[in-house]
Amino acid sequence: MADPASYRPAPGEIPVEPGVYRFRDAERRVIYVGKAKSLRPRLSSYFQDISGLHQRTQQMVLTASSVEWTVVSTEVEALALEYSWIKEFDPRFNVKYRDDKSYPWLAVTVSEEFPRVTVMRGAQRKGVRYFGPYGHAWAIRDTVDTLLRVFPMRSCSAGVFRRSKAIGRPCLLGDIGKCAAPCVGRVDADEHRAIVNDFLAFMGGQTAGFTRRIEQRMQEASDNEEYELAAKLRDDLGALRRVLEKQTVVFGDGTDADVLGFVDDPLEVAVQIFSVRGGRIRGQRGWVAEKADEAAFPELVQSALMTLYEDSAASAIPREVLVPTLPADAATVTELLSERREGPVTIRVPKRGDKRALMETVEQNAKQSLMRHKMKRSSDLTARSLALEEIQAALDLETAPLRIECYDISNLGATETVASMVVFEDGLPRKSEYRRFTIRNEGQSDVAAMHEVITRRFTQLLKAREGNDEEGPGIDPETGKPRRFAYTPALVVVDGGPPQVAAAHAAMQELGIKDIALVGLAKRLEEVWLPDDEDPVILPRTSEGLYLLQRLRDEAHRFAITHHRGRRSKSMIESVLDPVAGLGPARRKALLKTFGSVKKLRAATAEEIATVPGIGAATAQSIVEALATGEQVPAVNTATGEILEDS
């Protein structure tokens, strides 16, 4: 613990302009990010009598060893920079909002010549119109499948579109009337764009006009005794009504708004958001956040708004945002959201009427979400703690192994040998820390490959400890983030028995690594082997500790096999295409990107191959002939005896 007086800035050194500040610990990791309208009074408040600070603030200033700041010109810039840094550094003392999951959106790629409707997750992109988010991807697909009979726009992937265009025959959706088939010229780009615009208008809330129009056309067809057309229009009308029935009407005036509800306790806060478009609830999402600092409720609301709209496209930000309490810097947040939406945004607290009633419903959902989260977390936390305690007791460790690394080797005979490193922290996967290795000395055994991987990994650790690697010390002084391989594990697990453990132990001894525990997990009887022990450690089959070690081993195996299959597909497609003259690395890469595997390339026609950029008709025919005469040999993983399917 550092004394805050030891790093307190000198009097008059802190500027009075608006800005963003960062506290760092002794290892230069960023532990807290904040903003201020005036930096001097805000930062000075952290260095008053420590007994007058909130308990979490006391812990933060005692953990920190330095503070730095960046001056900006406006409060809006300060707000944007603050949340950009919070996302980048993930400081331990900031409120950490995280989605419960990656929510699916109904997306229309309006920037393409022939726009496509599809399901998308993750960060929103430019040139795409989004609707949602939805609770489940199947809900989007059900909606789209129903609407395509009324708005037959394109829904196929780029590969299917190119293939249908090349062979001059539409896919199944085109044959059954759920696609206008622009790929084969049944409609041109303008006609297809008109269908897309109608679809967007309907999803945007302009529903009454479509239903009236179809009713009129159905009546006209019936009057003209065009009964087949009337029956089709009747079915179209039923499809539209089924979609509308699934979307609850909450506002009769066609309001576009996001409604946020909050429920918190001293440790956590739950957030629920209902997305209302055209007066109907189009989507719902929710978060549970850890309250890592003593933020007041308006600051929690502000954090939620910034997290919600930080990566949103302009079309995803509504005209109105309803919250239970105005954010701490309401004017600044409103200005920032208006800039991103490229139009006015209003943030307000509903006091009465339908909007207040909906907010109460949203808050009830937030309450239920927090309750489910606490029950699940309590169960998970208990199991993880028990697992770590059992491993500590079984291996006679001084402390519970909070960071565990597991290594696995995957190969095909004596070629294409790869290895994986997976990391679990506090019993949970830390996927950002996963690493892959390509074994440099081909032809060696799994045991020798394990020795090489452990040597390479812990050589980097020693360099990071000494600050002698080419990247500098273990913690980047600029970003406050740990560099690759800079963290020391409490336990190393290798996939295998005594030979693999002995190889890993020898590598660590050669490097002088003696403060890290090492075990091996053998698949046959799930035995845990320690270096230099003749007998294994046997954990009970119902042990949480054994279950955690199995999860580590299986995750390492999965990660290694995934890497291996990717390299194998690339090497196979290169080897079978060797006889084709004039086919260089760029063209082979384009073929692999388009078809993905040798199996799919073999199934393609010369016309389909010729659609790949850089591949002409003559070259495509040569590829077909080379694949037709080549012999396909099944690949086998020698470590497991498993036949690896070409995929």
Image (cartoon, grey):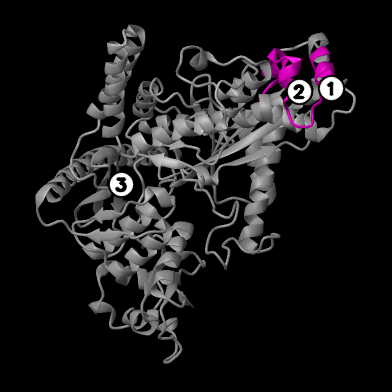
Which label's residue is closer to the chain start, 3 or 2?
3
Q: Nearer the viewer, residue 401 or 233?
A: 233
Front residue of 84 and 505: 84
Rendered location of residue 455, percent (x, y): 68, 45
Front-most of 126 and 59?
Answer: 126
Q: Amino acid at mark 1?
A: Thr
Identify residue for label 1.
Answer: 619
Q: Which residue is mark 2?
A: 610
Q: Which residues are magenta?
A: 596-625
Dot 1 and dot 3 residues touching (CB under 8 Å): no
Quadrant of the image occupied by residue 347: bottom left
- Residue 355, above or below 567: below
> Is mark 2 in CB contact (under 8 Å) with mark 1?
yes
Q: Is residue 127 left or right of residue 622?
A: left
> Which amino acid, mark 2?
Ala
Is 611 colored magenta in this rendering?
yes
* Image position of 193 (left or right of 499): left
SS label for mark 3 = strand
Tag of residue 287: 3
